[in-house]
Amino acid sequence: MVRVLIADDSDAIRLVLKDILVIGKHELVGEATTGEEAVQLFIKTKPEMILLDMAMPKKDGLSALKEILSIEPKARIIMITASDNQKTMRECISAGARAYILKPFDFQNVLKTISDISSS
């Protein structure tokens, strides 16, 4: 079981991710709807992993990623995006994201990615 923070401004996406976490028997420690809230909840809940959307209000995912990693360089962050923009994804990986997942989600792919990253 992995303790996971979900950060996405879409209620529907958070609901799908929560369902995936339940299927995988993972623990949801918090939900953020903005990049700023993601950083604050990371500090408060100390999750083992973060599912972090790229496009969020107040602070985008890349900025939140960098701030979280400045607080905890070993944070395990998986980026979530609807865009298959390879340049942006390479930038996230270079900044320290462990992986990225494209929307719409494939349940098995999300669970495999969480498993792979949690064991690395």
Image (cartoon, rainbow, N blue to C red):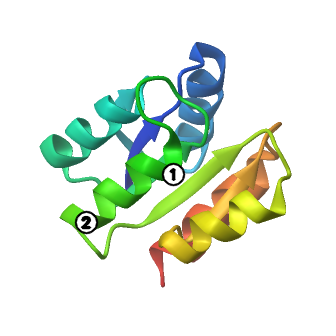
Q: Residue at x 28, y 53 (%)?
A: 47
Residue type, label 1: Leu
Along the line of sight, which residue is nearer the eye, 22 or 102? 102
Please tell me in which quadrant of the rendered image residue 105 appears: top right
Res 118 label: none
Rendering coords of residue 106 (x, y %): 82, 46
User: On the picture, is 59 further left or further right than 45?
Assistant: right
Name, please, the residue furthest toward the top. Answer: 11
Rendering coords of residue 16 (x, y %): 65, 28
Q: Quadrant of the N terminus?
A: bottom left
Along the line of sight, which residue is nearer the eye, 36 or 113? 36
Please tell me in which quadrant of the rendered image residue 5 appears: top left
What element does badge 1 sit on?
helix
**Up/down of 11 relative to 84, above or below:** above
Mark 1–mark 2 distance (CA, rounded to whole Å): 12 Å
Along the line of sight, which residue is nearer the eye, 68 or 45? 68
Which residue is the site of mark 2?
70
Residue type, label 2: Ser
**Up/down of 10 relative to 61, above or below:** above
Which residue is the site of mark 1?
62
Q: Residue at x 19, y 62 (%)?
A: 71
**Up/down of 54 relative to 9, above or below:** below
Q: Residue at x 20, y 53 (%)?
A: 46
Q: Residue at x 64, y 46 (%)?
A: 80
Badge count: 2
Q: Determine crowd level at label 1: few under 14, some 14-19, many 20+ residues with C-alpha closer than 10 A.
A: many
